[in-house]
Every structure is written in structure tokens, then in C-alpha cells.
Image (cartoon, rainbow, N blue to C red):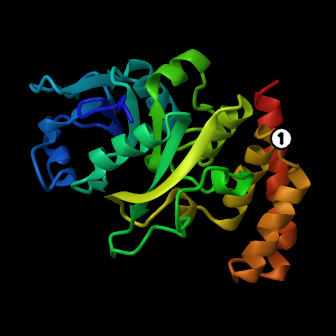
Amino acid sequence: MIKEFKKGDLEIVMATMNRDSLDFLIPMFPFCHFSEFSILIINQTSENKLLVSDFPSVRVVNSFEKGLSKSRNLGLQNAHRKIVLLADDDEVFKEDFESNILEAHNNYPEAASICFAIEGSNGLLFKKYPSQTKLQLNNLDIFNILSIEISLKKALFDQLKIKFDTNFGLGSSFMMGEEAIFLSDLKNQKQNIIIVPKVIAVHPAVSTDDKLNLEQRYYVLGAFLTRVSNYNYLKGVFLKLFFDIKQSKIKINQVFSALTSANKGKEDFLQITK
């Protein structure tokens, strides 16, 4: 098999904030110097705190906008390489992460996006992944994918012109769900999204979801399910309630509050997208 993708074809597109030094990259690559990889940093900052790179392989775009989805969009727009890997500024890459990503894209050239596995700081998998490569993803699979698991073929992204919805994600009206919406939009354009459960990085276990209370989580859920128009709103809300009750994340007497918050999120999303 002819390998279309080779070393140097991967670009790490990283979102960060208020950086004025590249030192934060050092612990992210414990096995070599970060300059050995092609990295594009989107640094959301102020005009008096700019990040500059002296390394040709590390490019920086200083942005004066706020919001993670805006950062992701700016990164995808400015990426130069054939394969893009979305990244956060607090993950630690595995030594073989680049070869695993390139191998997967060579093995599955029809895939627009290939998603990988992440470990928590405790050495355990971040969540439950398929035991082997999964070629057909359902809605629940897509809704469970994190942005730092996502790699994309740059040419397809440019052709399809899909963007992260800036109403969702940190720093926006609805603080979560941007990656699931992005992949859902990709799937709606009949593009293949697959999961290759090879671990590419370690990431701290704290997520945005952990920081939100029940009302906030269901508020975002209501907006999210409304945005993903091919998914039944009520079915989605009640499925979430069922699993949260089953896993003792909420109590029966909190159900009304959760439903009220979800409906408020739905109404607010419809209002801002009129």
C-alpha cells in the first residue's frame, strides 16, 4: 500500500490563552524537543501580552477574540499540513503519537476524521473506548468524543468549509458540546468518522462538565440537542436523565429542575439563532 501521509504531514493545532513564552510546550513532549513537530498555536491574549516563536516549526497566531470554538476555527483556517490534530495546552503526548496518527490515516484514507484515545493522569483510559477500530459511529459515539481526540484531513475540511459553532464551547453562551456538533455536521455531509483506540496523549481528568452544576449541564444539553437537529430533543433529554439517575448523578427530586433548565437552554438557543 502506498503511504500518502508521512512524517512531517501532521500539524498540532493548539488552543491556549495569555502565553508570552513557549516554555509550556516543554512538558508536553517529554521524549524530545517540541520543535521537532509542526505546531500551530492560537494564543487568545491581549495586545500587551504577545507570544512569539523563534522556531520555524512552531507558528503562533495571537488572537484578541475569546472562546474556544473561535480558537479552533482560527487554527483550522491557518493550518498548513495535510493532517491536523486538535490539542489543548495541558496534555502530554505519547512518544509514538505521530506515527500512530499517520498510520491510521494511511490505513483509512476514506476517513475525514479519525479519533484516538486519551489517558488520564492516573494512567487509566480517560473513558471507555471501543476494543478495536470502530468504522460506523452512532450519535452516542459522536456525542462522547473530546476535541483533543480529533484528527482531520485538512484538504477535506477546506473543501467542506465546516466550522466549530461559536455558540458552544468554553467562553461562549453554551460551555460544552462544540466537538460533538462539529462532528455531527461532518457526519451530516456524509463524511466518514472513525475511532482508532490507540492512546496518543495523557490529559488531566478534570473536564468542563465536572465544573458545571446540574442546572448548567442541562441548560447546555437543551441547546445542544436543539442544535443537532437530526436528534430527537425529548428522547435525548430523557435518555440523559435515565443514565444520570441510574448512575446516581441526580436524584428523582431534581428531575423537574433538570427539565426546566434543558427547556431554557433550548429557548435561549433558538432566540440567539433567529
Q: Which of 144 and 209 is in front in this view?
A: 144
- Quarter of the picture holding the C terminus: top right
Vertical comparison of 267 with 205: above or below: above
Can you name the residue that lies furthest to the top here? 159
Q: What element carries label 1?
A: loop
Identified at 74% across, 58% down, the residue is: 218
Q: Where is residue 189 in the image (x, y as percent from the top left)?
A: 71, 28
Q: Quadrant of residue 14?
A: top left
Identified at 55% across, 37% down, the residue is: 111
Identified at 57% across, 61% down, the residue is: 209
Q: Where is residue 91 in the image (x, y as percent from the top left)?
A: 31, 54
Q: Quadrant of residue 27?
A: bottom left
Q: Quadrant of residue 71?
A: top left
Q: Which amino acid does label 1 sit on?
A: Asn
Q: Where is residue 190 in the image (x, y as percent from the top left)?
A: 71, 31
Q: Which of 22 and 55 is in front in this view?
A: 55
The residue labelled by disc 1 is: 230
Vertical comparison of 166 with 95: above or below: above
Q: Can residue 159 be seen in this view?
A: yes
Q: Can residue 66 be seen in this view?
A: no
